[in-house]
Image (cartoon, helix red, strand yellow):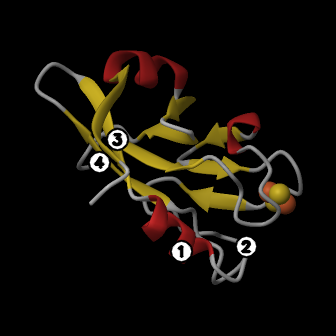
Amino acid sequence: MPDTEDEPVLPLAELRERGMAAVQVGTTRVLLVAVDGVDGEARAYDNRCPHRKWPLERGTLAGGVLTCANHGWSFDVVTGRCLDAGDRDLVPHRCRVDDEGMVRVSLDLDLARGRTLGT
Ligand code: FES
């Protein structure tokens, strides 16, 4: 059972204008990224960098790649894959766009914790 279920967080139109945005979902800071032309149209990730937990919202987004502002690690925002280290991908949260164009996020914090073990 997710810790938050399908919570509306931001209109997709606003996310597209901004490219990425950090939002609060329950007690968790989540990074949303617009992925135009890709199935789903948006992605949601834990806002902490898998390297040293720096807030990813302070990074830069260009050409589908998010670069952390702290040490410059980069991530493919469609897949979450880290382009600098093999086992440090972004931690995803479930995300969808509803019929009214609202981005909705579900958090499963146990799953997210499991995916960050060993980081
Ligand atoms: S904290 Fe993000 S690259 Fe080091």
In this rendering, position of residue 7 left or right of residue 80: left
Q: Along the polypeptide, which appears first: circle 2 or circle 3?
A: 2
Of labels 1 and 2, the one closer to you: 1
Instruction: State whether label 2 is within 8 Å of ligand 1.
Output: yes
In this rendering, position of residue 105 left or right of residue 61: left
Residue 84 placement (x, y as % from top left): 73, 73
| Residue 105 in sight in this render | yes
- How many neighbours does mark 1 have within 10 angstroms: few (below 14), some (14-19), or many (20 or more)? some
Distance from the alpha carbon under mark 4 to that under mark 1: 24 Å
Residue 108 placement (x, y as % from top left): 39, 58
Q: Residue at x 70, y 44 (%)?
A: 56
Question: Residue tagged by mark 3?
Answer: 105
- How many neighbours does mark 2 have within 10 angstroms: few (below 14), some (14-19), or many (20 or more)? few
Question: Residue tagged by mark 1?
Answer: 115
SS class of the residue under badge 1?
Answer: helix
Q: Residue at x 56, y 39 (%)?
A: 27
Q: Along the polypeptide, which appears first: circle 3 or circle 1?
A: 3
Q: Disc 4 marks which amino acid?
A: Val
Q: Disc 2 marks which amino acid?
A: Asp
Of labels 2 and 3, the one closer to you: 3
Question: Residue tagged by mark 4?
Answer: 38
Distance from the alpha carbon under mark 1 to that under mark 2: 18 Å
Distance from the alpha carbon under mark 2 to that under mark 3: 27 Å
Task: Tell me the quarter of the image containing the N terminus.
Answer: bottom left
Evaluate if marks 4 and 1 touch, with contact meaning CB atoms under 8 Å apart: no
Q: Nearer the viewer, residue 73 or 49?
A: 49
Evaluate if marks 1 and 2 touch, with contact meaning CB atoms under 8 Å apart: no
Q: Along the polypeptide, which appears first: circle 1 or circle 2?
A: 2
